Image (cartoon, grey):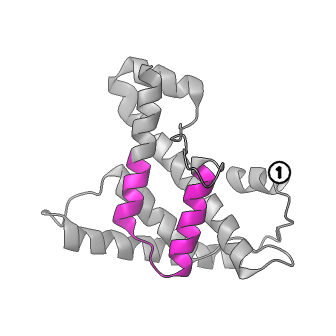
Amino acid sequence: MPLLERKLSISKSRLSTTYNAAKESEARSCIESWYNSLRDEIKRSFMRQTNGRLDRHKICACIYIAIVKQPLLKVINGTAEKDRLVNSEVAFLACCKILFSFMLENAKSEPSLEKYLRTRKILRFPIARNSDSDESYLVQTIKGLCHAQKNNELNALSLANKFCLIEDCTISEMKT
């Protein structure tokens, strides 16, 4: 909710903010169902021990896909594309926050990393160096995820690699 409130306060688009407890409960149930389904599929298809736990990158990827499959926001007088974009951004940033929480919890055994994360309170994204765009890594990633979603090509394992890259970029910045 704090992420959504912040997004709404700085957004150039007007978003519907009507609160509906029944819809929230239904959306939460659908997101949980999508997440469980994706998690179980990854366990069956890609893990040697199907009763094991997913790593934090795959958890974030499954949560991202579950959220975008059950859109939470609608742009007033917008298009399906704008709705997809805003929901993708919120889902991605929420998953980055989840990743950060995992990193902070695991950093307790490494005091310098824990201090860095507690001080910075933010993940570091790779620097995008494309000759055809001056958009940030975050913007390019969200646009790419929207394109994949539109074409029914979202892949949890590929998305997990993006979260791994973001974690590595954050840790690398601490060491420089």
Classify mark 1: residues with Cα within 10 Å, few (<14), some (14-19) or many (20+).
few
Is 113 one of the magenta-colored residues?
no
Is 150 one of the magenta-colored residues?
yes
Residue at the spot x=68%, y=78% of the render?
Answer: 23
Quadrant position of the C terminus in the picture: top left
Tell me which secondary structure the magenta stretch mostly adopts: helix
User: Front-most of 147 and 134?
Assistant: 134
Q: Which residues are magenta?
A: 138-164
Image-based side of 153 in relation to 79, left or right: left
Image-based side of 115 in relation to 50, left or right: right
Image-based side of 155 in relation to 75, left or right: left
- Where residue 100 appears, x then y in whole percent? 49, 41
Identified by mark 1, the residue type is: Ile
- Where residue 10 appears, x then y in whole percent? 82, 51
User: How many marks on residues?
Assistant: 1
Residue at the spot x=53%, y=37% of the render?
Answer: 124
Q: Can you tell which quarter of the image residue 106 is in?
A: top left
Q: Is residue 101 above or below residue 35?
A: above
Report the residue marked by disc 1.
10
- Where residue 12 appears, x then y in whole percent? 86, 58
Quadrant position of the N terminus in the picture: bottom right
Residue at the spot x=56%, y=80% of the render?
Answer: 150
Residue 115 visible, this orientation: yes
Q: Can you tell which quarter of the image residue 67 is in?
A: bottom right
Residue at the spot x=38%, y=29% of the render?
Answer: 107
